[in-house]
Amino acid sequence: MSQPNIPNISPDISITRDDAINLLLASIAMEELGLAHIINAEGEKIQYALGTLPGLTPSASLEDILQVNTSVQDTLELAMKKELLLDSKLKQVTQITTGSGVTGATGATGATGSTGDPGPTGATGATGDTGATGDIGTAGPTGPTGDIGPAGPTGATGDIGPAGPTGATGDIGPAGPTGPTGDIGPAGPTGATGDIGPAGPTGATGDIGTAGPTGATGDIGPVGPTGTTGDIGPAGPTGATGDIGTAGPTGATGDIGPAGPTGATGDVGPAGPTGATGDIGPAGPTGATGDIGPAGPTGATGDIGPAGPTGATGDIGPAGPTGATGDIGPAGPTGATGDIGTAGPTGATGDIGPAGPTGATGDIGPAGPTGATGDIGPAGPTGATGANGTNGATGPTGATGTNGTNGATGPTGATGTNGTNGATGPTGATGTNGTNGATGPTGATGATGSAGTGSAFVETLKIGDLNLQIPFNVNGGNNQAIGALAFSGSTTTLNRLSTYVTQVGSSGNFQMAVLSPLTATTSQVIAVTPVVTSLTAGLFTLPLTTPVVLSSNTVYHLAVYNQVNGANLGGRSTGVSGIAPAPINFRVQNLAGFTVGQIINTSDVQLISPWIAGLS
């Protein structure tokens, strides 16, 4: 069945009693129209089974036709039950159109009954798409900084971006005193070689032990621990240089005498030629650089945690330009120099013996504090770039320093355009109704109001009996109007005429009128509506240009002039012919419309009646 096209009623209900009656009549007409469509479909079903409508291959058997007949019979039985309900509904509506007295004062409201238990909540419907993000409000004040939680594991190191320009070198502070050399701890795993920092001051050299004679070179065994170095003896006189013979065993090294005074530093020689530059490894792909927000002020530097193992080093980006070198700070004071012993005569240089095996490298002691930096000499030529060493394992992350103060909040970015709304999710199932609360006592009945004047209503047939769509050119008529009898049982004043549009069509003249029968073949126009050129589906109402009073116990013709191309009106196959003095329904052709006082020939009887109603 078709869906009723009832006008939307907003929360502010502002319809009159007459409007409510019209809506009820329209709902009945729509349900009747739906039944008409169903009955028509059942007829086409029988035609299809019998072969009068093409498309069924092979032809239906007798058993198939009997099954179709049974199906149609079941459908028609249901349609008849629906017709009985609609007839009852129409009778109830027509009863409320008669006059009613003025409503008496409302009696006192009875006490509210106890509320029943709420029914179970229905299933939640699917969530709809998120609406567009509203504008960002102004930022609130920054709350106090909470305690720093434990540091999480260090993520993989990203590719190294291009180096920024080198800032100016600050002044070098004075060097602190050299601390005592601590005990050498066990060597940890060798991490990746970092950049070479400035060299610290050389620690005190221990005494050199006496060297033993060099034995035959055997297989290189495991390196033993290095013995303590004995004192260096005084150097003997230099003998004449003989031929270089085979290297004898190395004599015991005497104790080293005190160092002589340091000679003046010679001028720096010219820089040697630049060594060949090694091949540059292929550069890794540069990741997409995000937009850099404005930098906030630098927070205070927290305490430096213990250094973990070095993580994998990313690819080295191209070096930025070197910034200007800052001024060199003043050199720190030189420590007191010990007394220098007298230098002994230089002994003859012996033949160079074969090199002994390299002793195991001792554990590296912790670096002492950095001594004062001397004047920087001219830069030597750049050596060839060595291949990158393998990266050491990443060490644990040091404790996070306290957060610095938050930088000023940057300006809010422009809000993006709203995306299109997603489709509405399905409505969740309705929960079952809770049990009704007990009914409160009935309030006292108000006094009966005085009798009212009623609401006039006449019609050509019951809207619930519609079973036909009447086209604008029904039966091949030309510029035609059709009408049907309506009975007025009491003196009635009409202000409006209504009909039921089942198909809107395109455009053309449309008008309705009230006619008073004069003879068996003529009627006179006594009231008309304005002429319109377009229609809307469903109940269609036009005002009369002048209200008209209908006498009691009198018949009238209600007629419609429909020249809207493609438009259909709701009606019914009904009526009889050959009855005087006025036909039940008629058609008249070659009209230009209705005018008050016009005489209409009603002799062309058509056994169809449009539904037309007159309203006060």
Image (spheres, rainbow, N blue to C red):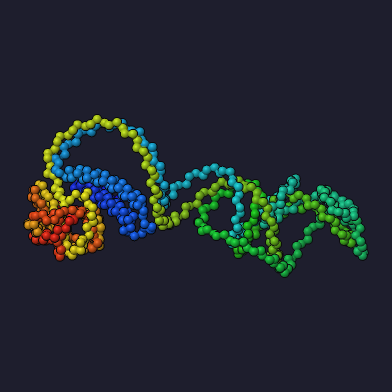
Picture coordinates of residue 58, whole percent (x, y): 38, 57
Examine the image and state in which quarter residue 282 appears: bottom right
Q: Nearer the viewer, residue 54 or 348?
A: 54
- Compared with residue 461, is residue 324 higher up or lower down, i.e. above or below? below
578 or 93, which lies in front? 578
Residue 481 lies, in percent from the top left, at 16, 60
Direction from residue 221 to residue 528 in the image, left or right: left
Q: Position of residue 428 (x, y in %)?
A: 39, 44
State the image quarter where residue 320 is shown: bottom right
Nearest the eye: 592 or 391: 592
- Residue 367 in the figure: left or right of residue 295: right
Check the image and name the residue furthest to the left. Answer: 518
* Picture residue at 25% right of the left edge, 56% below the top: 502
Taking the spot 62% from the left edge, 47% from the top edge, the residue there is 398
Residue 22 shown left or right of residue 60 in the figure: left
Residue at position x 44%, y 56% from top?
Answer: 413
The residue furthest front is 62
Residue ID at (25%, 59%): 504
Q: Position of residue 269 (x, y in %)?
A: 74, 67
Q: Is residue 532 visible?
A: no
Q: Is residue 35 visible?
A: yes
Count of labels in the image:
0
Q: Considering depth in this image, is 481 or 457 the residue closer to the camera? A: 481
* Residue 322 horizontal side relative to residue 553, left or right: right
